[in-house]
Image: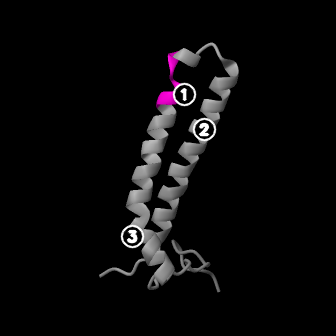
Amino acid sequence: AKAPVGRSAVPAPAAPMRRKPSWREQREWEGMEAAILAAEEELARRRAAAGDPAIASDGAALTERWAALAAAQAEVDRLYARWAELEAHRVPG
């Protein structure tokens, strides 16, 4: 038999069931806002340090500061991604 017109023969995947977060996840979620704020402050400090005109002619210092800036940005990105994961697991209500 053919699949009805306009419908896929493959069923759509079921939405993942939300579950109650573990104690550890709940504590992590509760501290996430503070962790993100601290990481964003560190990112701002690293950004200012990387833009310091006093080191503009020092290639080694520039490389070091830009690497630190990239690491700080990666940490902010990681925290936001983790926060989204934790939010996805929270049971509404």
Query: Which callout, 2 or 3, points at the residue further toward the start of the chain?
Result: 3
Question: Which of 93 and 16 lies nearest the eye of the viewer?
Answer: 93
Instruction: Check disc 1 and report the residue beneath it.
Output: 50
Where residue 14 appears, as percent x and y from the top left, is: 52, 81
State the SS at label 1: helix
Q: Give the mark, 1 or 2, whose residue is nearer the N terminus.
A: 1
Look at the image and tell me whether residue 15 can be seen: no
Q: Are marks 1 and 2 in contact (CB under 8 Å)?
A: yes
Give the mark nearer the N terminus: 1 vs 3: 3
Disc 3 designates what residue?
30
Q: Is 38 one of the magenta-colored residues?
A: no
Q: Is residue 91 above or below residue 28?
A: below
Q: Is residue 35 above or below residue 21?
A: above
Q: Which mark is residue 61?
A: none
Q: Which mark is residue 68?
A: 2
Q: Is residue 34 visible?
A: yes
Secondary element at tag 2? helix
Q: Gap between marks 1 and 2, in whole Å?
A: 9 Å
Q: How is the image coloured?
A: one colour
Q: Give how far across and how far down residue 12 sits, in percent.
A: 55, 77
**Badge 1 amino acid:** Ala
For the point 58% across and 18% down, the residue is 55
Type of amino acid at the residue the image marks with label 3: Glu
**How many numbered marks appear?**
3
